[in-house]
């Protein structure tokens, strides 16, 4: 293990966080202002090369307080800072904005003290990266104070020993005798000197999640945010800063990922001298928090990654960190089961006979788990009733002995049994709503906005969370269940709680998210044997925060293989394949109407946590045989796919072909996936070059028995042959190193 090291240079007043891969430099500037110097490739030492230059700039105010106010060359308006205040000389976007009892919003934080500790400081009631041993990391805590407001702000920096990772979060404590209102508080600020920087984001929509968008930055503001109450399909809480020349395998990249599942905001501001400020944290729109005396507020954590090996290098760092030090529980490294879900096969219209028909077809094919989806509870026959009533709909499965009988049948066939829940939602047509209409998020005297004929429970109220917990426990304590699909099929509107006073309504959205985390933590702690899978209309809450509780999530409701190429490719920019479920569904596809072969559907879905979403009884014997082969292939390659190193090779956002590969830890096995969308007349003979293999090793194609050296596969490449003259084609090649033979 290499060492994480944090050193404070008293003479230069510089903190240097470093390991064998990265360095992070912070300076205490004149007047105790905290200045950002550097984050990037490891440097052996620092001798003042980034000391911020002095220049008198018109209309940039000078530092308040003697003796600094006379130095016209020094201004917070241009200084690269670690955490900026508001209305005290810096006209750029602030990291923190507080309102005192007199109505003033000014903040001016100066250095007070610091502490360096082994290990990592834990957050309370929030998801986070962690360490298993204090030797894995070191943490720097820098305490800043605003003496006028009598509040302390602690900035936490953790550097891992063996990862190009620095985590950051902030804690504000009110030491005064008066309430202070937080109106904005960032998890992270990163100020960069003038340079050509591009930003990559992951925008999208329902059934079109996490598209890769790359853009140059111009003077002014660029914002990536969600105000939907969740991290959302529409904008993922992740960005990457890259040089214009950065590619998948070359160049520098800095990733910033928020470990949070609610409203988020990334603000990038290029100032009038081309410096760049990046802020990340809770979305300030609609947010406020009443901080009482001696109380504190913790921001969500951010995960910063540096790579000088392109986007794939950045992605690898995130994949390992999220898989190894964010995800938890007994399924963290477990081989995830192959699932069949009844949703697209039956929707709400199922009974014991229909379900048993699916089981009879699935078990002989090698499917390992059956999941009963929406419709098993309350009196749920369509999507306008029963959410919030988590008791068994006895009439549906009575002929099969109810949920217990079904669970027994599934287990008797050697399969595991899973169940669908949507714990955060409520229907007006439900026993819970009739008993407790106040449990729903709503504004008094205002008509509620429906979405999918459902509404949102007020999870900012502990009694609401307790109610849902008790209902779920009553099921889970009495029915043998191995898996839960946790869905969320609408976003938040009328974000108001009747349990809070008028001046604290800005707290509701964040308190809601804390309630979700509380319920998830209580359930996963009580039932460690259950595999929990996140789902929010597919991939609508696909983020590091949910991964802390649920090791996998639905990547998208869109199961069309051609659409999935972009969705899965974009998702891998910052999330590991072990977190990405991918299912084969019927053709024509339910979302796009596109007809595709069972082969291409399988070849896309097997590049994830694999399963099926179709009615097996409607398939021909030939199709069933093909599914059996797909399952057999996946079982053979499951460890490599779910926990191997994943590399993107050809982007679906840039051409007609897509390619990616999986490589095991010692690089002796590799899986190469190739996809082509549209056929052409007189097709070009394209080549795919593999990556991250052993240059001198001899790799044998396990189907054709052809042999190629590693550097041959990487530098010369393979023709994508034979060419199938059809739309929507794919191929998969499995290579193993020939023992005791080199080129």
Image (cartoon, grey):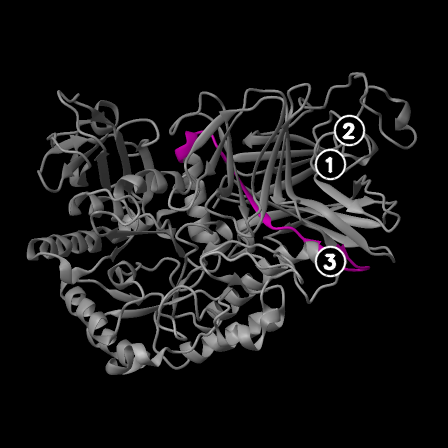
Tell me what residue is drawn at x 11 percent, y 32 percent. Answer: 724
Instruction: Tell me, yes or no, whether the highlighted magenta stretch contains residue 293.
Output: yes
Instruction: Tell me, yes or no, whether the highlighted magenta stretch contains residue 451.
Output: no
Give the mark, 1 or 2, whose residue is nearer the N terminus: 2
Q: Which residues are the magenta region?
A: 290-312
Mark 1 to mark 2 CA distance (whole Å): 8 Å
Can residue 436 be seen here?
yes
Q: Which residue is mark 3?
A: 504
Name the mark nearer the viewer: 3 or 2.
Answer: 3
Residue 146 located left or right of residue 306: right
Mark 3 to mark 2 CA distance (whole Å): 32 Å
Give the mark, 3 or 2, whose residue is nearer the N terminus: 2
Q: Is residue 568 above or below residue 498?
A: above
Q: Position of residue 5 (x, y in %)?
A: 60, 42
Q: Which mark is residue 76?
A: 2
Q: Is residue 330 above or below residue 581?
A: below
Report the number of numbered marks.
3
Can residue 694 be seen here?
no
Disc 1 is placed on an element classified as loop
Mark 3 to mark 1 CA distance (whole Å): 25 Å
């Amino acid at each position: 293990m290499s060492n994480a090291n944090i050193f404070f240079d008293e003479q230069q007043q510089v903190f240097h966080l470093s390991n064998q891969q990265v360095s992070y430099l912070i300076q205490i500037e004149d007047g105790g202002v905290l200045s950002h110097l550097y984050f990037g490739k490891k440097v052996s030492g620092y001798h003042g090369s980034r000391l911020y230059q002095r220049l008198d700039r018109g209309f940039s105010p000078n530092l308040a307080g003697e003796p600094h106010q006379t130095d016209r060359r020094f201004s917070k308006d241009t200084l690269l800072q670690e955490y900026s205040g508001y209305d005290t000389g810096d006209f750029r976007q602030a990291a923190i904005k507080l309102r005192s009892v007199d109505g003033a919003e000014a903040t001016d934080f100066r250095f007070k003290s610091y502490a360096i500790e082994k290990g990592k400081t834990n957050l309370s009631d929030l998801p986070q990266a962690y360490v298993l041993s204090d030797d894995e990391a070191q943490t720097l805590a820098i305490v800043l104070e605003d003496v006028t407001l009598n509040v302390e702000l602690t900035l936490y920096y953790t550097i891992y020993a063996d990862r190009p990772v620095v985590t950051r979060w902030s804690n504000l404590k009110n030491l005064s005798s008066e309430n202070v209102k937080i109106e904005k508080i960032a998890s992270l600020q990163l100020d960069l000197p003038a340079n050509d920087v591009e930003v990559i984001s992951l925008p999208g929509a329902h059934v079109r999640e996490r598209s890769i968008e790359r853009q140059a930055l111009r003077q002014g503001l660029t914002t990536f945010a969600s105000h939907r109450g969740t991290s959302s399909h529409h904008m993922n809480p992740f960005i990457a800063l890259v040089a214009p020349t950065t590619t998948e395998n070359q160049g520098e990249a800095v990733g910033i990922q928020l470990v949070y599942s609610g409203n988020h905001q990334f603000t990038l501001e290029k100032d009038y001298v081309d410096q760049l400020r990046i802020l990340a944290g809770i979305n300030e729109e609609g947010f406020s928090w009443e901080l009482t005396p001696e109380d504190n507020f913790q921001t969500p954590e951010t995960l910063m990654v540096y790579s000088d090996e392109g986007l794939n290098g950045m992605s690898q760092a995130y994949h390992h960190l999220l898989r190894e030090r964010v995800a938890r529980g007994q399924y963290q490294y477990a081989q995830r089961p192959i699932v069949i879900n009844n949703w697209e096969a039956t929707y709400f219209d199922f009974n014991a006979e229909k379900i048993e028909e699916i089981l009879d077809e699935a078990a002989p094919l090698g499917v390992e788990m059956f999941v009963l989806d929406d419709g098993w509870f309350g009196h749920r026959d369509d999507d306008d009733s029963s959410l919030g009533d988590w008791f068994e709909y006895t009439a549906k499965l009575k002929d099969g002995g109810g949920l217990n009988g079904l669970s027994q049948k599934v287990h008797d066939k050697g399969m595991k049994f899973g169940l669908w829940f949507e714990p955060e939602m409520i229907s007006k047509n439900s026993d819970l709503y009739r008993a407790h209409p106040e449990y729903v998020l709503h504004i008094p005297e205002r008509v509620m906005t429906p979405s999918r004929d459902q509404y949102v429970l007020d999870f900012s109220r502990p009694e609401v969370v307790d109610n849902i917990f008790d209902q779920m426990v009553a099921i889970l304590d009495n029915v043998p269940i191995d898996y839960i699909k946790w869905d969320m099929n609408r976003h938040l509107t009328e974000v108001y709680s009747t349990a809070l006073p008028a001046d604290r309504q800005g707290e509701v959205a964040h308190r809601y998210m804390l309630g979700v985390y509380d319920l998830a933590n209580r359930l996963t702690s009580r039932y460690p044997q259950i595999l929990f899978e996140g789902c929010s209309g597919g991939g609508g809450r696909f983020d590091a925060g949910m991964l802390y509780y649920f090791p996998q999530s639905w990547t998208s409701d869109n199961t069309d293989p051609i659409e999935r190429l972009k969705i899965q490719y974009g998702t891998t920019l910052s999330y590991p394949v072990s977190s990405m479920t991918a299912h084969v569904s019927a053709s024509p596809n339910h979302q796009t109407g596109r007809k595709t072969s069972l082969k291409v559907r399988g070849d896309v879905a097997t590049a994830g946590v694999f399963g099926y979403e179709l009615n097996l009884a409607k398939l021909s014997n030939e199709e069933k045989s093909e599914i059996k082969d797909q399952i057999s292939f996946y079982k053979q390659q499951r460890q490599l796919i779910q926990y191997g190193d994943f590399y993107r090779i050809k982007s679906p956002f840039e051409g007609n072909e897509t390619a990616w590969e999986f490589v095991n830890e010692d690089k002796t096995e590799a899986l190469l996936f190739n996809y082509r969308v549209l056929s052409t007349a007189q097709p070009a003979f394209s080549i795919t070059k593999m990556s991250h293999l052993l240059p001198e090793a001899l790799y044998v194609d396990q189907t054709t028995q052809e042999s190629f050296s590693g550097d041959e596969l990487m530098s010369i490449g393979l023709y994508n042959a034979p060419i199938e003259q059809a739309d929507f084609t794919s191929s998969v090649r499995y290579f193993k190193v020939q023992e005791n033979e080199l080129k």
